[in-house]
Image (cartoon, rainbow, N blue to C red):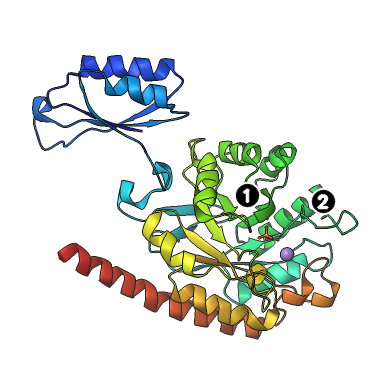
Amino acid sequence: MIIQYVVGTTSEQREEVHAKLKSWGLRVAENPGDVGTSPQDRIYVDNVFGNVKDAHRREVSTLECVKKVIPIEGVPQNLSLKRRGRHHTVSLPLPGGKGSVDIGGGNPLVVMAGVCAVDREHTLASHQMARRAGADMNRGGAYKPRTSPYDFQGLKEEGLKILCDARREVGLPVVSEVLDVRDVELFMKYDVDMLQIGTRNAQNFELLIEAGRTGKPVLYKRGFSNSIDESLKAANYVMEQGNDNLIFCLRGVKGIGHSFRNQGDLDEIVALSHLIDRPIVYDVSHSAGKKAAVGEIGNMACAGGVDGLLVDVHVSPSDALVDGFQAIDKEDELREIIQTWRSLSQLVKAKVKEYGRRQAAN
Ligand code: PEP
Ligand code: MN
């Protein structure tokens, strides 16, 4: 809830309210108020987080110094564009410590390209190919969430080691999916640059909390049957741990369409970029599920103003352990696709900025 105080409320009165809120287990984010005015004329407002009950709201609203209690609805405050007024950048240091990959905040498009599942034979070559073709990061799954228990489940710790050894040679940060709270520590041991929460774990709140606690950037994938509202609330579990490095990933949903592996949710790029300040990325390969459609679906995402794209690559798709059918295998083809994405993205981001400036001027 948001508490608005009557003009002239003293800091002692506010502290009393804060003590009460804290005794209920709630957290208070104090707002400095309209700092242009003198303290006695200031309108103070506090944001209150946690399990706010109706009884809390009722009791607070009866206090003499409280003018209004406003329930927080819609986009969680932590992610809200309205709250900060500009898009946030998540930065990942490049291996070796020189420079960074910056996602969101109007920065150029970030391409995360790599194998769907880490393998022993082709991961390094695939990730080197992705870099030569223009990728900024590598993706690679060591733990794979599979529909059937008989399917390959990932190389697990060995996969993390291969991925992170390859990182040293390739020189790009890596993102990898963590499936279970018990594995989070292992991801820290290998210093995986970004933790991915997959669509099947989109409401695994314990996992979101543990991933959030690491402080590492977290790539949160929308659940394929979750509404945007449910997804934003779940993603907020990461930020509630004091982790600012949340990246929101769309990847298509279960729908009535049959043309692609998933029904694209590209229009949500536009909706979300008006609502949240976190970087928004799109997993083109898992949305399209067809190698031949990856370039064009990525074009659509860039036209919508996306901050980054995930794409599966593999130098020998017929040997890929998972999803070889959707992986780009030719360096020249990937380079051309990425170049088109970058030009589109540049054009659209420049327009968004121009539009933003015009709006600000009006
Ligand atoms: C993946 O990125 O390898 C993956 C399994 O994605 P999703 O959770 O979106 O299906
Ligand atoms: Mn896959």
Say if disc 2 is inside 8 Å of ligand 1. no
Q: In the current view of this chain or complex, which residue is farthest to the right?
A: 150
Q: Are marks 2 and 1 in contact (CB under 8 Å)?
A: no
For the question of whether residue 93 can be seen, the reply is no
Dot 1 lies on which element? loop
- Name the mark on residue 202: 1
Estimate the x, y position of residue 343 in percent, counting from the top left: 45, 80
Residue drawn at 16 percent across, 32 percent down: 43
Q: Quadrant of the N terminus?
A: top left
Q: Which callout, 2 or 1, points at the residue further toward the start of the chain?
A: 2
The residue where tag 2 is placed is 158
Dot 2 lies on which element? helix
Estimate the x, y position of residue 203 in percent, counting from the top left: 62, 45
70 relative position to 67: left or right = right
For the question of whether residue 46 can be seen, the reply is yes
Say if disc 1 is inside 8 Å of ligand 1. no
Residue drawn at 69 percent across, 44 percent down: 187
Q: Amino acid at mark 1?
A: Ala
The image quadrant where one finds ligand 2 is bottom right
204 relative position to 280: left or right = right
Q: Nearer the viewer, residue 22 or 292?
A: 22
Q: Nearer the viewer, residue 351 or 225?
A: 225
Q: Quadrant of residue 96?
A: bottom right
Estimate the x, y position of residue 38 in percent, counting from the top left: 8, 29
Question: Is residue 235 positioned above or below 45 on the image?
Answer: below
Estimate the x, y position of residue 282 in percent, counting from the top left: 55, 66
Residue drawn at 9 percent across, 34 percent down: 37
